[in-house]
Every structure is written in C-alpha cells, then in structure tokens.
Image: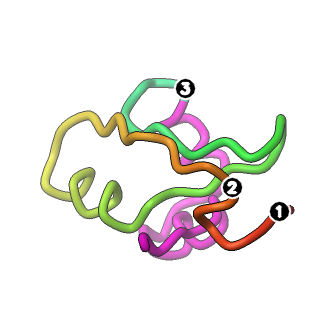
Amino acid sequence: MSEFLTSKQVAEQYGVHRNTVMNWVKAGRLTPVRLSRRYYLFKREDLEAFERGGRVIPTSAPVAEMGGTV
C-alpha cells in the first residue's frame, strides 16, 4: 500500500506554502488523489517522481485502499 501525504505535509517537505503545492496541481505538475472538493492526498512515490523532474499523473487510489473515509 502507498504512503499518502496531505498538501500541508508536501508543502513542509519542499519548504513552500500550501498555495504553491496547489499551484503545482493547477499547472499539471502534480495530480493528487482527490477525496473531496477540498481534500487532497499525494502518493509518496508520485512525489519522488516529481523530484526526479517532470509531470506526475498518478493513478487514483480508491478511498477504501487508503483504509477508510475522511
């Protein structure tokens, strides 16, 4: 099972503001797993691919795969 991070955790990891993470999403550089209209998660392996450079379009994991609901 993949490890997931919130947009806040991603921002902390890269030393940027959460708005920057969401700008990356809007620009198509990252594609989150969308749980609701306002709640996103990011797969750690997708972030590793992002670090290597390039656009990341992950396959979305169903909520059940992540161990529950939000």
Quadrant in which residue 43 is drawn: bottom left
Q: Which element carries disc 3, helix, strand or loop? A: helix
Farthest-out residue, top: 27
The residue wearing badge 3 is: 26
Label of residue 69 in the image: 1
- Residue 30 as seen in the image, left or right of residue 34: left
Where residue 4 sits in the image (x, y, percent)? Answer: 53, 69
Q: Which element carries disc 2, helix, strand or loop? A: helix
What's the residue at 61%, 56% (across, down)?
A: 41
- Residue 41 as seen in the image, left or right of residue 56: right
- Residue 40 as seen in the image, left or right of residue 55: right
Which amino acid type corresponds to the residue marked 3 in the rendered image? Answer: Lys
Q: Is residue 53 magenta?
A: no
Q: Tell whether label 1 touches label 3 (CB within 8 Å).
A: no
| Magenta range | 1-25
Tell me if mark 2 has few (under 14), some (14-19) or many (20+) residues whose alpha carbon lies within 10 angstroms of its own.
few
Q: Which one is in front in this view, the residue at disc 3 or the one at disc 2?
A: 2
Which amino acid type corresponds to the residue marked 1 in the rendered image? Answer: Thr
Residue 33 vertical placement versus 29 (above, below): below
Quadrant in which residue 27 is drawn: top left
The residue wearing badge 2 is: 63
What's the residue at 15%, 46% (across, down)?
A: 53
What separation in Å lies between label 1 and label 2 (alpha carbons)? 6 Å
What's the residue at 55%, 35% (across, down)?
A: 23
Q: Tell whether label 2 touches label 1 (CB within 8 Å).
A: yes
What separation in Å lies between label 3 and label 2 (alpha carbons)? 22 Å
Tell me if mark 1 has few (under 14), some (14-19) or many (20+) residues whose alpha carbon lies within 10 angstroms of its own.
few
